[in-house]
Image: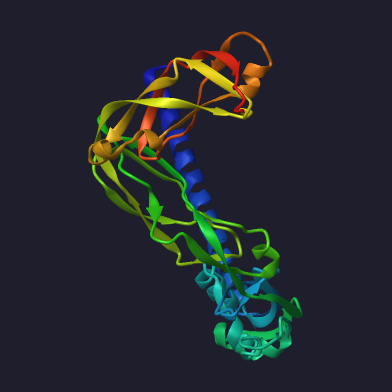
């Protein structure tokens, strides 16, 4: 087969392909056109169908708290033309509708002793229908009853507990007691929840690099169904530069009978600690309580007693002492004639 024959054959197939593509395009055009006409015809008809009506609830009685779950959507049986249904679904695809509790219950619950209320949805049919598109007629609502269960809001006073995680800049420390502006607050809610709450714990306040006194607001840890008054607190964190100090403190003895004398070697310990510059001169031996226990000596196991630091002021830190054990000698006291 020569080149002329090949070119004729190639042209023949190209013509066939073009003709085939034209036929396909014409076919698709008429299919699309007929689909559009079918769709328009379908939208022009009247239908009875169900649509979802998502709701969010607002304006609850101020003196009560809701204790049950409410339906998040209503099922509406409606009659409307296809165009109206399509427009409604497109316009409300991502919306929830407000459900005014006080309005729909005719304010019967606020300020009254009534805690349970059954709302027949047939009684609010006209109100909901007004919120739909004008061409949609509402025939029925499901569920047929919305049940509201409330509990009176009570209150009690509980102590505040701070949750702090503080890190200080080098050579700085806490300069005193960290106190909230209030030591107690009111917690409000239903009795069933209120009985189990004994404190108002704050959310974690985490600060680092502290080198000056700082004031911060903190919220309370959320408890579902309860609220705090006030809703947040101001916390003052005193910060100051510190220095290292030393002090000799005499060792005291616990559980010592009157008839016995316990001699300790040595009789005191040397403490070292960090203290803020403003309190350096005010530290005395009486701020510390260092003790041993006579009962440990009376057991007769060895001749050493463990020394324990029972108390130190809250404005010092990193307290160390030496020695941590002492030797002892037990003597009977001489009776007085």
Q: Quadrant of residue 32?
A: bottom right
Residue 191 versus residue 326 in the image, above or below: below
The image quarter in which residue 271 lies:
top left
Farthest-out residue, front: 337
Residue 264 as seen in the image, left or right of residue 206: right
134 relative to 269 in the view: left or right: right
Residue, x 62% and y 59% (percent of image)? 197
185, above or below 86, in the image: above
Image quadrant in which you'd find residue 5: top left
Is residue 38 visible from the viewing direction of this image? yes
In the image: residue 93, left or right of residue 53 = left
Say which of 333 and 280 sits in front: 333
Quarter the C terminus occupies: top right
Q: How many marks are shown on the rendered structure?
A: 0
Q: Position of residue 70 (x, y in %)?
A: 68, 70
Looking at the picture, how far across and down is residue 189, in whole percent? 61, 69
Decide: is 38 above or below 324. Answer: below
In this orientation, which residue lies closer to the viewer: 164 or 264?
264
Q: Where is residue 105 in the image (x, y as percent from the top left)?
A: 65, 87
Q: Quadrant of the N terminus?
A: top left
């Amino acid at each position: 087969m020569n080149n002329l024959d090949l070119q004729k054959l190639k042209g023949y197939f190209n013509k066939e392909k073009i003709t085939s593509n034209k036929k396909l395009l014409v076919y698709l055009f008429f299919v699309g056109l007929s689909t559009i006409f079918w769709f328009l015809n379908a939208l022009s008809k009247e239908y009875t169908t169900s649509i979802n009506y998502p709701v969010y609830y607002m304006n609850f009685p101020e003196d009560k708290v809701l204790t049950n779950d409410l339906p998040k959507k209503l099922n509406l049986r409606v009659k409307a033309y296809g165009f109206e249904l399509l427009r409604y679904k497109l316009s409300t695809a991502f919306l929830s509708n407000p459900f005014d509790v006080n309005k729909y219950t005719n304010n019967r619950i606020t300020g009254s002793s009534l805690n349970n209320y059954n709302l027949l949805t047939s009684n609010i049919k006209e109100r909901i229908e007004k919120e739909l598109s004008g061409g949609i007629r509402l025939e029925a609502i499901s569920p047929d009853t919305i049940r509201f269960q409330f509990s009176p809001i009570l209150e009690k006073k509980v102590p505040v507990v701070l949750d702090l995680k503080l890190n200080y800049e080098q050579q700085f420390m806490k300069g005193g007691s960290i106190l909230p502006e209030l030591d107690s607050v009111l917690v409000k809610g239903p009795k069933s929840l209120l009985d189990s709450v004994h404190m108002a714990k704050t959310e974690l306040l985490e600060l680092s690099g502290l080198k000056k006194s700082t004031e911060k607001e903190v919220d309370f840890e959320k408890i579902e169904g309860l609220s705090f008054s006030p809703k947040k607190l101001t916390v003052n964190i005193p910060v100051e530069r510190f220095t290292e100090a030393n002090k000799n403190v005499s060792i005291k003895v616990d559980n010592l009978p009157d008839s016995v004398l316990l001699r300790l070697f040595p009789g005191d310990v040397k403490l070292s600690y960090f203290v803020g510059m403003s309190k350096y001169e005010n530290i005395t031996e009486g701020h510390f309580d260092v003790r041993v226990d006579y009962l440990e000596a009376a057991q007769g196991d060895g001749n050493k007693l463990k020394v324990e630091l029972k108390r130190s002021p809250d404005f010092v830190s990193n307290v160390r002492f030496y020695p941590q054990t002492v030797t002892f000698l037990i003597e009977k006291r001489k009776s007085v004639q």
